[in-house]
Image (cartoon, rainbow, N blue to C red):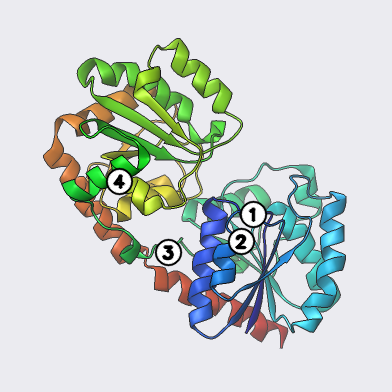
Amino acid sequence: MNILYLTNHLNTGGITQYLLSLSAGLKKRGHDIYVASGGGELEGEFSRLGITCFKVPLRTKCEFAPGVFVSFFKLLPLVKIYNIDIIHCNTRVSQVAGCLLSKHSSRPYVSTCHGFFKARLSRRLFPCWGNKVIAISEQVRDHLLNDFKVDKKNIVVINHGIDIGRFVRANREQSLCARKRFGLPDEASVVGIIARLSDVKGHIYLVRAMPRILQQHPDTLLWIIGCGKMKKELTELVDKLKITDKVVFTPEARDTAGALAAMDIFVLPSLKEGLGLALMEAMAAGLAVVGSNVGGIKTLIQDRQNGLLVPVADSAELAGKISSLIADPLMARRLGDNAREIIASKFAYQSMITDTERVYCQCLNQKD
């Protein structure tokens, strides 16, 4: 099977990691993989897997930008030259391009819904969902059904799969080594988050929780990994709260396994979340995790069984739950062990590959 993936860019992030995982797994099964995007810092990772990358002007937030149509015209002959069997889109912008490609090449196309969309008129008039829609969680599936009236029979829930072998529960020596590499202090309790700096990820509530945490545990350090439009607002808030020496900003960490090894607790206080790939990786690494009681996070965390849930946008509750984990290492250890176990058992990497491959086959059979 020849598979063409479309996405806006190949920079660090959940969608790029999703495509890397799918591409690697399907490549091992003998499929030929092609990726079309606006390029990015992780393009080399795809090339090292033997995957052909096409650079097209899809790096835009506007679904009807000229670059979307230029991409369509550039890719249409390539679909025929490389005998593409199926097109798989991963963003709203790439869905529009993929829909055009599908209509003019008679190739089926699939889209993955990685989160929650605003119900704009353009989405209702030009849905562009494809032959099948992959929802990354039950909550995303409900969003597609209720907000966009996508046909139930066309939606397939396939959770992100995690290669558990990439992550280990770090021992003391490994943790110290990781902290040295990232310039973090040895003895601090490191509370971390890996997410783009966007208001929907809820960083601001985590920062506001820090003064309360520091009152009980003055050696705590908040490590924020990610970049985005909220950086200025967050740094100003840190300055205002006078906790600049207790918060570290790092633009990105390509080696998420190494970054997680340096943490004691992982927090994802999102206002909305399709599933939460970074949270899944933290759980795979055996970390104690705290997340908002919202979206796909509820799929991952069973409160007090494999992590702790908090109400959305509640800094006081965040502070209390994080402080309880710092104060009780045995509880943190138990929750981390259970978190790793549920990722290994219910979110297996190979299951994602197999289930996605099955969707492709269904689309091709429908075509025939």
212 up-or-down from 335: above or below: above
Q: Are marks 2 and 1 in contact (CB under 8 Å)?
A: yes
Q: Are marks 2 and 3 in contact (CB under 8 Å)?
A: no
- Under mark 1, the amino acid is Gly
| Residue topped by disc 4 | 178
Picture quadrant of residue 176: top left
90 up-or-down from 215: above or below: below
Dot 4 or dot 3, earlier in sequence: 3
Local secondary structure at mark 2? helix
Q: Nearer the viewer, mark 2 or mark 3?
A: 2
| Residue topped by disc 2 | 43
Q: CA distance from mark 4 to mark 1?
A: 26 Å
- Under mark 3, the amino acid is Gly
**Of the numbered discs in the image, which one, if any, rests on residue 64?**
none
Q: CA distance from mark 4 to mark 2?
A: 26 Å
| Residue topped by disc 1 | 40
Q: Residues within 10 Å of mark 2 (few under 14, many from 20)?
A: many
